[in-house]
Image (tube, rainbow, N blue to C red):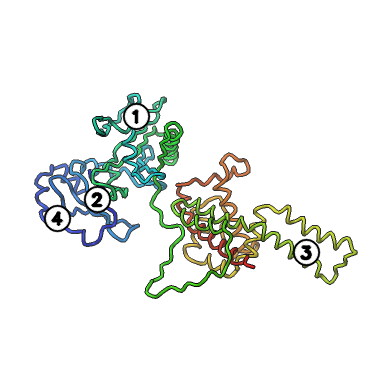
């Protein structure tokens, strides 16, 4: 089976010049499978050789059609299984409608080598699984040695099975893998998990995902094999400038002074766009860098106001105590309060309000937004300023990322995990943190 090509140019969507050659060799069942796929939006473009068929399907998330090449021998399997599966919502993969089966694309982020090549470097020893699944291992020849790669193992309680093997035809058909970038002899591998039904679809899905994560953790801990589930395709969390470069862009000597630590954190946030929680935390650390400075500046402002008061009397203990209280308040301020002070003093209110007025922001930061366990932003709220709401949300989101799930202080809101659906939805919150970081840097120039 060949690999799919993503987003081909329109010129490549041509019909094969000899469409009847393959049609004459197809069985009745394969022709019926072709007809069913056509009703589902998979348009047959033509064929190559004796058994490879090319399809085009329009993907709503892309501007162009996606091309898929598949062996004719897989047509019946694809047509009979495609209705029973859908794309996974958090990871690049497919899942059965009842959640009892899932197939994940895997990746090895710390290596430039494609994950399939890494998988083929390993030969596993495991007991035969006493189950109904048919496992056909892929054989790899390296020099004079030939061995099987992948595995199929069953849980001791016989309530789950895990398999690492060649990508299935239905996965290949439903979900782009990106492996068209690799050589033609490249084999893509996926992690497949089956579990016995334990309840509703959500419960089953949670169990399959937990099983996959447990296996990957053990592969890393016991064998040093750091594989992970591939996340769904992400856009840049921090959008690049989309200006037309028809005119020279003006540049001048830097007008602001940025501490080395701040510059490094800001730069890393831009590099970490494929790991949204890291990008968010990097911008938060920029805010954290300035919290003591802004809190101290706020305390000095309060003290000066007391001294400049026309009723201030240096011989009056009450007046002196008010100054001491202002100084003590700085020492005892919590991180959340320090962040509120920072956003209030550094972010321009009109610019902050404007940030939340876009259609994307109004949906994302509402109570029905994709991130749970954090305050919503309501521009019409009269009991809290916009800056206070923004600070509370940023701090709550920071806690969801860095605090362990079993900490009793954060028991009501579980940890926001990397590669999760919520992590993949962090873009607007990252842009908010970036906006506040820029406002803070500008406001703290001497």
Q: From the viewer's perspective, tell me whether residue 288 is left or right of residue 92.
A: right
Label 3 secondary element: helix
Q: Position of residue 195 (x, y in %)?
A: 39, 33
Label 2 secondary element: strand
Q: Badge 2, how many Cα within 10 Å: few under 14, some, many 20+?
A: many
In this rendered view, identify the residue nearer to me: 331 or 259. Answer: 259
Q: CA distance from mark 4 to mark 3?
A: 81 Å
Q: Which residue is mark 3?
A: 303
In this rendered view, identify the residue nearer to me: 49 or 416. Answer: 49
Q: Which residue is mark 2?
A: 68
Q: CA distance from mark 3 to mark 2?
A: 70 Å
Q: Nearer the viewer, mark 4 or mark 3?
A: 3
Q: Position of residue 255 (x, y in %)?
A: 56, 70
Looking at this view, name the residue that lies furthest to the front.
253
- Tag 3 or tag 4, which sits nearer the N-term? 4
Q: Residue 16: which numbered mark, if any? A: 4
């Amino acid at each position: 089976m060949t690999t799919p090509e993503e987003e081909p140019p329109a010129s490549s969507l041509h019909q094969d010049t000899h469409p009847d050659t393959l049609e004459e060799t197809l069985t009745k069942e394969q022709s019926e499978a072709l007809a069913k796929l056509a009703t589902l939006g998979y348009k047959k473009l033509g064929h190559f050789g004796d058994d490879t068929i090319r399809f085009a399907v329009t993907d709503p998330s892309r501007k162009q059609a996606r091309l898929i090449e598949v062996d004719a021998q897989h047509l019946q399997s694809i047509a009979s299984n495609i209705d029973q599966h859908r794309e996974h919502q958090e990871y690049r993969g497919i899942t059965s409608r009842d959640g009892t089966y899932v197939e994940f694309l895997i990746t090895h982020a710390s290596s430039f080598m494609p994950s399939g090549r890494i998988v083929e470097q390993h030969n596993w020893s495991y007991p035969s699984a006493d189950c109904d699944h048919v496992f056909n291992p892929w054989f790899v020849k390296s020099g004079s040695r030939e061995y099987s790669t992948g595995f199929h193992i069953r849980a001791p309680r016989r309530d789950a099975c895990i398999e690492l093997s060649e990508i299935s035809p239905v996965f290949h058909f439903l979900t782009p893998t990106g492996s068209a970038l690799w050589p033609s002899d490249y084999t893509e591998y996926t992690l497949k998990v089956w579990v016995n039904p334990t309840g509703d679809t959500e419960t089953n899905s949670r169990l399959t995902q937990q099983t996959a994560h447990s296996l990957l953790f053990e592969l890393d801990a016991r064998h040093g094999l750091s594989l992970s589930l591939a996340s769904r395709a992400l856009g840049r969390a921090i959008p690049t400038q989309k200006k037309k470069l028809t005119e020279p862009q003006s540049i001048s000597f830097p007008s602001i002074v940025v501490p080395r630590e701040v510059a490094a954190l800001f730069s890393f946030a831009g590099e970490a766009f494929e790991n949204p929680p890291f990008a968010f935390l990097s911008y938060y650390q920029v805010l954290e860098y300035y919290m003591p400075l802004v809190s101290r500046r706020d305390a000095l402002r309060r003290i000066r106001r007391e001294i400049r008061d026309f009723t201030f009397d240096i011989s009056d203990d009450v007046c002196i105590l008010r100054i001491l209280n202002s100084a003590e308040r700085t020492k005892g301020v919590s991180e959340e309060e320090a962040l509120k002070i920072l956003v209030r003093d550094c972010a321009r209110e009109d610019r902050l309000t404007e940030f939340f007025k876009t259609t994307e922001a109004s949906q994302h930061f509402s109570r029905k937004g994709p991130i749970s366990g954090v305050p919503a932003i309501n521009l019409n709220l009269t009991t809290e300023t916009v800056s206070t709401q923004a600070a509370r949300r940023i701090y709550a989101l920071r806690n969801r990322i860095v605090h362990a799930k079993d900490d009793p202080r954060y028991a009501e809101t579980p940890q926001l995990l990397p590669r999760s659906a919520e992590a993949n939805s962090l873009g607007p919150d990252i842009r908010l943190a970036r906006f506040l970081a820029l406002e803070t840097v500008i406001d703290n120039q001497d």
